[in-house]
Image (cartoon, rainbow, N blue to C red):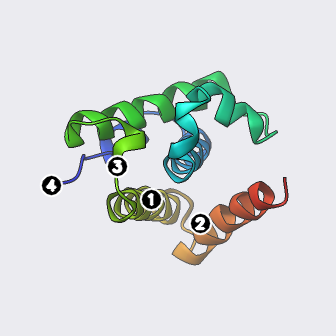
Amino acid sequence: MRADLSALLKSLPLAVSIESAYLAMRILRYRFLLEQMSRDSIIAKGGAHESNESRRLALSLLSAIEAEEGRKIQELDSSTVEEYVNQLSSLVQARSSSELGAPTSSAEALLNQLRERERSL
């Protein structure tokens, strides 16, 4: 099945988890760049000021996915990547809703803002 990423995302504060999920999703989506660039380079290219904690957790999320799938991120097909992106997004939305008492749409709005920022770079 799919790697259980919820334990990793629950291990750190919510803001770090949101940022980490976003970074992991960015790497998943830009996985073909991993042939020419490192994960850290792709993260840095986004221009955001992620914390070291967020970067470490994002890399742990990606390692968990690779372990579950038995192959490197850049070898994953589009449907597998979308399943993980959806899983990460859902986990962050559920945690945000639970911890902040905010509706799921608020977490989704935050993720959409992060994605928009990335598109404008």
Q: Nearer the viewer, mark 2 or mark 1?
A: 1
In this rendering, would 82 be left or right of 100?
Answer: left
Q: Nearer the viewer, mark 1 or mark 3?
A: 3
Proximity of marks 3 and 2: CB atoms separated by less than 8 Å: no
Q: Nearer the viewer, mark 3 or mark 2?
A: 3
Mark before the other along the chain sequence, 1 or 3: 3
Number of other residues with Cα within 10 Å of mark 3, as a class: few under 14, some 14 to 19, many 20 or more: some
Residue at image position (77%, 61%) is: 119
Mark before the other along the chain sequence, 4 or 1: 4
In this rendering, would 58 be left or right of 55?
Answer: left
Q: Is residue 72 above or below residue 118?
A: above
Identify the residue under disc 3: 76
At label 1, the amino acid type is Val
Q: Is residue 120 above or below residue 104?
A: above
At label 2, the amino acid type is Ala
Element assignment for label 1: helix
Element assignment for label 2: helix
Report the quarter where the N terminus lies. Answer: bottom left
| Mark pair 4, 3: CA separation | 14 Å
Give residue 85's mark. 1
Identify the residue under disc 2: 107
Give residue 1's mark. 4
Number of other residues with Cα within 10 Å of mark 4, as a class: few under 14, some 14 to 19, many 20 or more: few
